[in-house]
Image (cartoon, grey):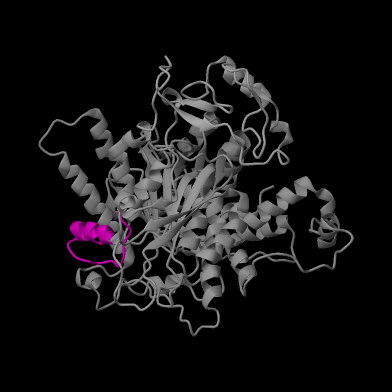
């Protein structure tokens, strides 16, 4: 049923969706008025102890509010910034300047279940790093007031040790964002999170709750430095953590290419025609008492000696043993008299190497590499402790999909975008990145400010522009192959900024005393009055962007002008999955209406003020859900 919410720019209302899912699964939990009866839920969970409140859980002050913030829809939107974009007509890379919780909510429209890899390097809770203030919601200090008053960006609060909510503030910030981010991951998606020792144990608990303890994959130790510090009387910290969680059990880590050292462990002492092999133990770590089903007599075919398990059960079942014996895959020692065989694992059948959870600096780079890498691109040290692109390339190597979307919503200096480009060039991939960075002010006395960067997001954009130019220049002076041209075409990015809606309808508040039908009527009256009061001097591209985002288009949409329309400007919008005709003219001509009346199979979006009641009725009646008036 149509409601006023269908006409308001806002991200999906996850609370409403979750309640609707509950209603579908458990209708008896709801009253006749459609309200969730919490007593019925309690009865289903544990009817004998509905008053029981003690249970194992991870709680902190502000957790419930952080969860509400995560599921509260936003009415913000994104505007395309053509001036700061690079190769915008072709590239599918995205950089978004804005507060990341609100941006994540907006991305739900077009990217839910589509992100394969998330990497984030959030601010560490050291007492000096800034925190994100979740004061974006309606009725509180406006984000716009903090950003639009100054081109220098916004200053965010520090989280001092003297603050009684030192840990709680940081947990609030991470919890809400991870809750939304999980909805963006594809079923086989995975998230990698860099963190230091201060909050690693707390972050692990949050991730267990958000992603599920069963989806924990690894705690990688990355060697960020290789020298000890003489400026401390305590331990020198040379590693950081990277927590890895999958969304579901569909994620499969990509194995690494085999190395010469690994292959050298195979040999062929018995001249097996199948080639080199390596022996695997036939003994099980478990005792016979623990695995009685793996206890049976085995007979050496060469000596006839029968052996029973003693301290260890066998690793394979009786049926598997018989098959291995028949296939000549059991090795009974150099003289053939061993009582317990080993199993031949042939090199020709060997898979790649499983990744380990210790990444040394030679393998994944270090912070010195990250600093020199960024300085080489931008000319000076403008960002503290940037991650090296090699670290994130190692992450990308563990995901099989080379066509995936990679999201980083704590983009910082933009290392993730740099790593995506590098890895695509290395393996011929077509990965796309989405980087999100709040327009945080740089310090007035910093190298970044002296270099002309007023905001961290300016560094994010400048770094990835420099990467695109460097890569493109590397192809100068030689014949370019088709594969190399593909990599050149992928370079660049579209820049979007988080902003208020262009439509005053987002300020509409429903009357809680009225029905949905009555509120819809009130909404239409509100829109008619408010939008007719305006000069309607809206930017066409801003309106199109806002409407397409609200209709679930990805930010990589392309617009193609349609010459068959003589009396209106009509575009065909497509993001590779969704497609629709769109017109944001203030008046819709009869000829345009006639075209869509004759082509009801085509999707068409226009703005409501362009229609009189007759045109709207005719189009809706003829095109049904293919037509939408915003």
Residue 386 included in the magenta stretch of the image = yes
| Residue 10 visible | no
Residue 611, percent from left and from top = 53, 47
Say which residue appears at 48% left-offset and 82% top-offset.
Answer: 161
Outermost residue, left side: 477
Query: How many numbered discs, if any?
Result: 0
Picture quadrant of residue 155: bottom left
Say which residue appears at 68% left-offset and 65% top-offset.
Answer: 57
Tell me if residue 56 comes above or below residue 264 in the rendering.
below
Picture quadrant of residue 450: bottom left
- Magenta part of the protein: which range? 368-388
Residue 616, percent from left and from top = 58, 44
In this rendering, position of residue 159 left or right of residue 380? right
Residue 22, percent from left and from top = 74, 50
Q: Nearer the viewer, residue 511 or 75?
A: 75
Q: Nearer the viewer, residue 140 or 247?
A: 247
In this rendering, position of residue 464 left or right of residue 306? left
Say which residue appears at 44% left-offset and 41% top-offset.
Answer: 399
Picture quadrant of residue 431: top left
Outermost residue, right side: 48
Residue 564, percent from left and from top = 39, 32
Q: Nearer the viewer, residue 31 or 40?
A: 40
Residue 116 included in the magenta stretch of the image = no
In this rendering, position of residue 359 left or right of residue 87? right
| Residue 133 visible | yes
Tell me if residue 584 comes above or below residue 463 in the rendering.
above
Say which residue appears at 66% left-offset and 57% top-offset.
Answer: 15
């Amino acid at each position: 049923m149509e409601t006023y919410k269908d006409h308001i720019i806002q991200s999906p209302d996850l609370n409403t969706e979750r309640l609707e899912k509950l209603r579908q699964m458990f209708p008896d939990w709801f009253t006749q008025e459609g309200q969730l009866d919490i007593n019925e839920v309690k009865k289903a969970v544990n009817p004998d102890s509905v008053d029981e409140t003690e249970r194992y859980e991870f709680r902190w002050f502000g957790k419930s509010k952080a969860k509400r913030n995560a599921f509260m829809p936003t009415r913000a939107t994104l505007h395309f910034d053509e001036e700061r974009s690079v190769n915008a007509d072709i590239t599918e890379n995205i950089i978004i300047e804005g507060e990341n919780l609100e941006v994540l909510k907006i991305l739900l429209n077009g990217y839910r279940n589509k992100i394969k890899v998330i990497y984030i390097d959030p601010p560490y809770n050291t007492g000096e790093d800034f925190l994100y203030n979740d004061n974006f919601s309606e009725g509180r200090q406006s984000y716009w007031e903090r950003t639009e008053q100054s081109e220098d960006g916004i200053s965010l609060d520090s989280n001092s040790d003297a603050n009684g909510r030192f840990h709680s503030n940081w947990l609030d910030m991470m919890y809400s964002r991870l809750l939304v981010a999980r909805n963006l991951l594809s079923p086989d998606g995975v998230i990698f999170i860099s963190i230091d020792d201060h909050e690693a144990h707390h972050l692990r608990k949050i991730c267990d709750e958000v992603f599920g303890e069963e989806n924990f994959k690894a705690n990688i130790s990355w060697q960020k430095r290789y020298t000890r510090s003489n400026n401390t009387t305590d331990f020198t910290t040379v590693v950081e953590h990277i927590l890895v969680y999958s969304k579901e059990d569909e994620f499969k880590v990509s194995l690494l290419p085999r190395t010469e050292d690994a292959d050298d462990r195979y040999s062929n002492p018995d001249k097996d025609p199948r080639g080199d092999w390596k022996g695997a133990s036939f003994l099980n770590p478990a005792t016979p008492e623990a695995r009685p089903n793996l206890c049976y007599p085995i007979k050496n075919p060469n000596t006839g000696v029968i052996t029973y398990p003693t301290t260890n059960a066998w690793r394979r079942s009786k049926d598997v043993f018989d098959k291995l014996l028949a296939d000549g895959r059991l090795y009974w020692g150099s003289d053939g008299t061993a009582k317990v065989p080993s199993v031949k694992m042939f090199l020709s059948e060997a898979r790649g190497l499983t990744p380990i959870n210790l990444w040394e600096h030679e393998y994944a780079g270090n912070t010195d590499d990250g600093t020199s890498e960024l300085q080489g691109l931008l000319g000076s040290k403008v960002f503290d402790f940037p991650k090296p692109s090699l670290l994130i390339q190692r992450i990308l190597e563990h995901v099989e999909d080379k066509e995936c979307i990679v999201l980083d919503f704590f983009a910082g200096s933009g290392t993730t975008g740099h790593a995506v480009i590098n890895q695509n060039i290395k393996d011929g991939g077509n990965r796309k990145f989405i980087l999100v960075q709040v327009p945080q002010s740089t310090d007035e006395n910093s190298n970044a400010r002296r270099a002309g960067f007023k905001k961290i997001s300016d560094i994010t954009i400048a770094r990835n522009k420099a990467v695109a130019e460097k890569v493109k220049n590397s192809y100068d002076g030689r014949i370019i192959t088709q594969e190399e041209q593909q990599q050149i075409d992928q370079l660049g990015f579209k820049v979007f900024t988080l902003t208020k809606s262009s439509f005053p309808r987002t300020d509409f508040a429903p009357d809680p005393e009225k029905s949905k039908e009555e509120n819809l009527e009130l909404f239409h009256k509100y829109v008619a009055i408010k939008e007719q009061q305006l000069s309607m001097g809206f930017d066409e591209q801003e309106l199109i962007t806002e409407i397409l985002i609200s209709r679930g288009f990805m930010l990589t949409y392309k617009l193609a002008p349609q010459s068959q329309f003589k009396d209106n400007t009509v575009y065909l919008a497509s993001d590779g999955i969704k497609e629709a005709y769109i017109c944001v003219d203030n008046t819709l001509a009869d000829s345009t209406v006639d075209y869509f009346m004759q082509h009801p199979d085509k999707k068409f979006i226009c703005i409501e003020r362009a229609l009189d009641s007759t045109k709207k009725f005719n189009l809706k009646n003829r095109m049904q859900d293919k037509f939408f008036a915003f």
